Structures are given as C-alpha cells and as structure tokens.
Image (cartoon, rainbow, N blue to C red):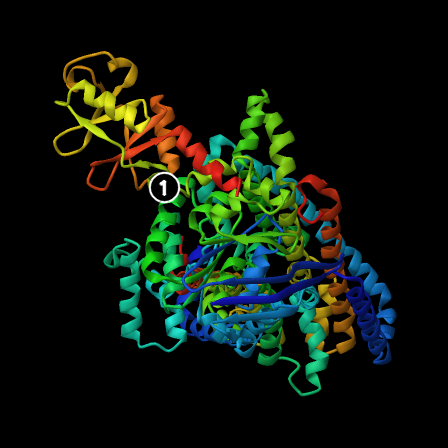
Amino acid sequence: MRRLEILQYMIDNLGLIGERTLQHVSIVSVAVGLAILTGVPIGIAITRNRQVADAVLYVASIIITVPSIALFGLMIPILSTIGQGIGYLPAVIAVLLYSQLPIIRNTYTAINNVDPALREAARGMGMTPGQRLRQVEIPLAIPVIMAGVRTAVVMNIGVTAIAAYIGAGGLGAFISAGIADTDVRQLVTGAVSVSILAIIADFFLLWLQGRLTPLGVKT
Amino acid sequence: MIKLEKLTKIFDTPGGTITAVDHVDMEVGEGEICVLLGPSGCGKTTNLKMINRLVVPTSGKIFIDGKDTDDYDPVELRRNIGYVIQQIGLFPNKTIEENICIVPDMLGWDRKKSRARAAELLELVALDPALFLTRFPKELSGGQQQRVGVIRALAADPPVMLMDEPFGAIDPINREVIQDEFLKMQQTLRKTIMFVSHDIDEAVKMADKVAIFRDGKLEQCSSPDDLLAHPANSFIADFVGGDRTLKRLRLVKVSEAMSKGAPSVTAESPVADAVKAMEDHGHANVVMVDERKRPRGFVHMNDVRDKKGPVSDHYEALEATVDAREDLRTAVSLMFSNDVTWLACTDADGKYAGYITQRGITHLLGETYNQ
Amino acid sequence: MNRTFRVVALVVAFALGAVAYQQGVIPQIIQRWDDVWFLGKEHMLLVAVSGGLAIVTGIPFGIWLTRPSMRKAAETMIQGLNIGTTIPTLAILALSMSLLGIGKVPAIFGLWVASLLPIVRNTYTGILAVPPHMKEAAVGMGMRPNQILWKVELPNALFVIFAGIRTALAINVGTVPLAYLIGGGGLGELIFSGIALDMTDLMLAGAIPVAILAVLTDFAVAQCQLWLVPRGVNPLR
C-alpha cells in the first residue's frame, strides 16, 4: 500500500524531481569543474617539490575530514559578511574544497608515477617541459585524474544533498522536508533519486574515463 | 666528430661530493662506434648524458663537429642527437608512427615527409609498415620495441647517436640478432655513435673503439683487439677477463690465420705426387679437391708414404671445412667439435683456399703479445 | 611530514584559535560547555557503537566472501557493495528512518550500513591480494585452511583492512552529525538548530567540536594503522 503511495507521489512530482535534479547537478558540476581547473594545475605544480606536496596534501586531507555540515556551519559566519551565508554559494565552495584532495592527490601521484624512462626519453629527444607535459605526462595521467574526478563527484552528490539544509535546494530538499514532516513519501523519493543520480554519475564518469584513456594505455 | 676536453662532473650529495667523471679527454671519429665500458658507477653513463646535456658538466668542453655544445640551447641540441635508452621509452599513448615522428614533428618537418620517413625506417628493420605504423607499443614484442626505439632515434637523421645500453634489456638470443642488424645498418648509415655497455662481449663485437672507465677516469681508449691484446693495466686485464685471448678469436678472420698457397691433389693424382706436395710444403696432410676445386678429402703422410696407386684409394673424408670469411672462434669451435688439429678453408665460391691449424692460430695471437 | 611543516601547522592552528577567541567564539562554546559536553559524549557513543559494530561484522563478512564456497557469489556481491558505496549517507539515513522510524536505533543502523561497506570491501580485496605463492607455501607446509587464514592471509591483509576501517570511520564521523535529524542526538543538534535559528554561536558551538572530533578520530585511526600493523607488512614503516 505504502509502496504505491510513494510511487504515486513520485509520478505526481516528476517535474519537481527534475527541477531539483538539475539544481543538484548544477551545484556539483560547477564546483567540480572549478575544482578540476584549480586541482589539476596544483597537482602538477607540486610534483616539483616534495615538501610542498606533502604540505598541500596534508591540508587537503584535513579539509576533507571535516564533516560537511560542520564545514557549512563554519562557513556561514564568514560568508554572511558578504550576505551569502546560505544558499548556492556555500554549497559550491564546500564541494570545491572537498574535491581538492581527490583531484590534487590523483594528479600528483599520476604525474609522479609516469615511468622515469619515458621522462628521460622525452628529455633526451629534446622535448621542452611543456611538450613533455602535454604529449606524455598528462595523457598518461588522464585515467588516474579522471578516477579522482569520479571520486569527487560521487562524494559531493552526497554533500550537496546535505546542502539542502543551508537552502541550496537540490534533491536533499525532499529528504529535509520528509524528515521535518515525517513524510515517508518525500523521504524515499529524495533518498532514491539522489542515490540513482550518484550511481548514474559514477557509471557515466567510468565510461568517460574509458573514453579519455589513450588507446595505447588501455588494458 | 665528438671531442671531449677535460670533461668533469661532480655531484653534490648529502654524503659529500662525488666525482662521477674526472677530466676525460677523448675523441670519436666520424662514422665510428665508440663503446664506453666499465663496471656500474664508473661514470660511463654520466659521461654519455653530458653530451646531450641531460647532465650538465661541471667543467670541461664538448665539441660536436668542431662546435662547442655550450653554444646551443640544450633542447635544440638534443633534437639533433639521436638518443636510445635501455628501457626503450616508447610513449605508450602514441602509435609507432607517432613515436617515430616525434623529433621530425618538433623540428617542423613536413608531415608527409616525416610519415614517409617512418615507413621507410620500419622497413629498414624488417618491420612491415602496413602492419606496425598504427600499432601501439604494448602490441609489440620486446625485440620489436627495441628496434622501434633505435629507428625513432634515427628519424630526423642526426649525425650523432647516443645509446645507453640499448640492447641490455633483450634476451641473449634476440640481442645477437639485433646487434647484427644494427651493425649492418651502420655500414650504410655511418653515424657517429657513443654507446654505453657493461658487456665486454658486446663491446668487442660492436666497437671501433672501446673506452674503459673506472671511478670516473678514462683508463684506456683503443681498438677492441688492441684492448684485448694489450690491456694498459691490471684493472683492465681483470675487467676484460682471463679469457681475453679467447675473445680475440672473434676479432680475427680465418683468412688472416690461414696458410695460403697450399698445394692440393685430385682423386686421380698418384700418391707419389701427394707425398711430394707434403714434403715440399712441410705439412703432414694434403687436401684432395674435386673437379670444381672444392675440398673433398685429404691424405695423411703416414698413411701413404710407401703406398702406390691414385689418391682416391687412400684418402679420408674431411669432417669439416670452414669459410675463410668466418672468425677464428668459429674455426676453433669446428676443430674442437670434430677433434681435428687443422681445417681446410674455402673461399666465397666454396673453392679450396688454404688451411688453418691450431698452431697457426696460437702463433698469430701470441705474436701480438710479444710486440 | 617534516618538522618545520608541523611547527607551521601548529602556529597556524594557534593563530586561528586566537582569532576565534577574539571574535568571542571560544567564550560562547565555554558558555554552552554543558550542552557541548553532553551532546559530545552522545556523539562519540554513536561513533563507537556504530563503528564498532561495523568492524566486528564487516571483517567476518569480508572473510566469508573470500572462502572458496563463496567464490562465485562474492564477485556479484562486491559489485553490489561498490554501487552501495556511491549512495549518499543522508540517503541511507533517510531510508533507515523510513524503515525504522525515529530514534537511536535507526540512527545507529544507518551509520552501521554506511560504514560497513568499506570494511567488507577492503577485507575482501586485502585477503584476495595476498600473493598465491605465499598460500602455496603455507599449504606445502601442511597448514589447514584456518591456519592459513590466521597466520598468512589475515596478517598480510591487515594493512588493507585497516585502510578500510579508516575510510569507514571517516564516513561514520562525517555522518554522525546528520544522525540528529532522525533522532539520534549528538552534536548535530547544535549545528542544525543554529542554522535553523540563525544563531551563529550555537552553530559554531557544534561545528567546531565536530570538526575537531573528526580530525582527531582520523588521526587516531591513522596512528593505530601505523603502530598496530606489524612492520614487515606495513608500507608506512
């Protein structure tokens, strides 16, 4: 009986589900997009110096340990000073911060793990550092960097769900309303749709990772 | 072509300074293969890598074709020097064609020209371009990859090649094959090559000149035969091995140790002629040839001294003959396996050319030691 | 991590603390110390109970999946678990609430499920990653399957299992503040009430201890991993 009710609710609110899914996807994709633009260059830059790399990764790993709701709590007073304490911006910033560790760490290890023989061959043939990066190091690092992006996206679909509590919208809004009203229909709708979104994103990024992997490196 | 002047490299390490290369002076002529040889850590690889500036010299000069390499931008310099390493270093994300065309592309060659060049080079090492151009490195065997590694370095036709243990990672059987192929290519290409190795046999086989390093110092630089015959000191004698004389067998051709102008007899010749030929020539055997002058058998003095009749009644079959173009190693090996002390030698047409004896070989090799 | 960096980190932490004190944050937390202490204990109890349950159930389950009788079913189950790990923790709590209602039990159940998956997965992959030649040597010495498990497989998988526990507890500690939403209690109460009532001091009184607890827990587990896993099989030592 209850199952039918839930299904009925979902069908009745398909439009709302779609709208909130779009909000959800927008927060995650904007923030992870920005995280790629910052994290990949950082990850490449820190391969030059071991100590700086350790420090950067240490800070990023502390940030990722802070529970998301606590991070929101810590950001609200700071962002309130520019009138953006709740809503879209803190959600994007949180996702951006959380995405740094997987993306920086994967970029760093992937570039570091490029076979030294390839680097020597590239240098010996007269490639400039930029050519080495573009033609050899980055293409070989792409699968691992993409794995980091995938981790970041899946994790942050969950973080964004929690961001509903600071008014960022998204699929988490069904869950927060469901909890507030003890409404199983909204609760399940939110939980199931956000889970499906995460699973689909996971598969899509796995597929994308495969597409972006250079042919000669595929196993 | 390549000239090093007081080339020195000092590394600063936490444990103090290490002099990896110590005032090395040497010269490699155009079209020569110079093998840098020595135990690991002797500075041979550092010496090589200073030439294309992968390692920056602490002091000293390097001249290529009379020009100081200090005057070049390192990147420009490297693009004009072929470089082959032991790990091969083919880029797994690029096809064989892309790998070969890397340097030509960086030099701004016309695309058509560089792609045609890639196909031509593949043919040079007996890999079918139609099959291999579009493959990725992982789809090739180790030996095929190493061949591609070598032709990649040849792609822009650089006059100078640096090779850092290029055949070190290949199994012994394939290594021999690739070495032979490479030497054959070198006969027409005539590149000036510096070649690092730790394998004395490889050095003896490949080199026009061998440079032996120890603790960063150049100990001896001479031709392989000279090195084996006259090691400059006990370190080099130890390094080239107690069997260095055996190694020289490879360097000397049968024709050099062969007694030329030896008489021969035919099956129809009377035995007396054979005895006379042996007495005249001072050798206790004489070879019997057929109508096309190919060695067929021999008669021994003791068997025929007082006999009568034609040689065909008394001859023994030849267990083995050796081509005069082979090296002495092959000849000695044949003698041992057939339990004989001499061999009949043939020329390119299979005709009898002379004979080679164990005594003759010993004498030839011993001669140089007494100089 | 080098020493200079530790010193810098300490100085930065101290400076942040000083700024926070000046802004009146620390006095506010001290003012609410009773609440913070009470809810903090509840918070830690939630972590301990759900995390502990996840460890004592997850490891045996992971081991069971590696037994030969499970070989076929295990792969499918692990794939299922992998999909399970992508499900957001808030969704797990929400589903737990829709099944079990409100209170400590659904909270602990949800937390247990969320932390179970990494432990099972790492136990499974850790044991399967033990090189076959080691097991072959053990068989050749006449060990029984149980002896192989305790003397060869588990010790060599220990580091990977610990890594799973670390991930699990990180997820757990990150999710515990949300447990308040379904009646589990804990420091989440201060944060969510603070957000709802727009009371910064209340929010920070929750957020700061939660963040510190999370960082400390991760640090503690990392130290356990460093010192409890024997040196011979510990890549960090």
- Classify residue B125 as left or right of residue A173: left
SS label for mark 1: helix
Within-10-Å neighbours for mark 1: few <14, some 14–19, many 20+: some
**Badge 1 amino acid:** Glu
Residue at point 24%, 40% (across, down): B347
Residue A171 at least partly seen: yes
Residue at point 36% right, 41% down? B256
Percent x, y for residue A200? 43, 62
At x 34% / y 29%, what residue is drawn? B334
| Residue B278: quarter of image | top left
**Camera sees residue C87:** no
Image position of C111 with respect to B290: above or below: below
Residue labelled with disc 1? B256
* Quarter-of-image position of residue B267: top left
A45 left or right of B209?
right
C48 on left or right of B357:
right
Residue B223 in the image, given as x and y percentages of width and height: 48, 51
- From what the image shows, is residue B221 above or below residue C207? above
Left or right: residue B195 versus residue C161 is left
**Residue C219, image x and y in percent?**
74, 56
Q: Nearer the viewer, residue B59 or A49?
A: B59
- Residue C70, given in percent of the width and then of the height, sits at 48, 34
The chain under label 1 reads B
Judge whether B171 appears above or below B211 on screen. above
User: Of residues C46 and B356, which is closer to you in this image?
Assistant: B356
Count of marks placed on residues: 1
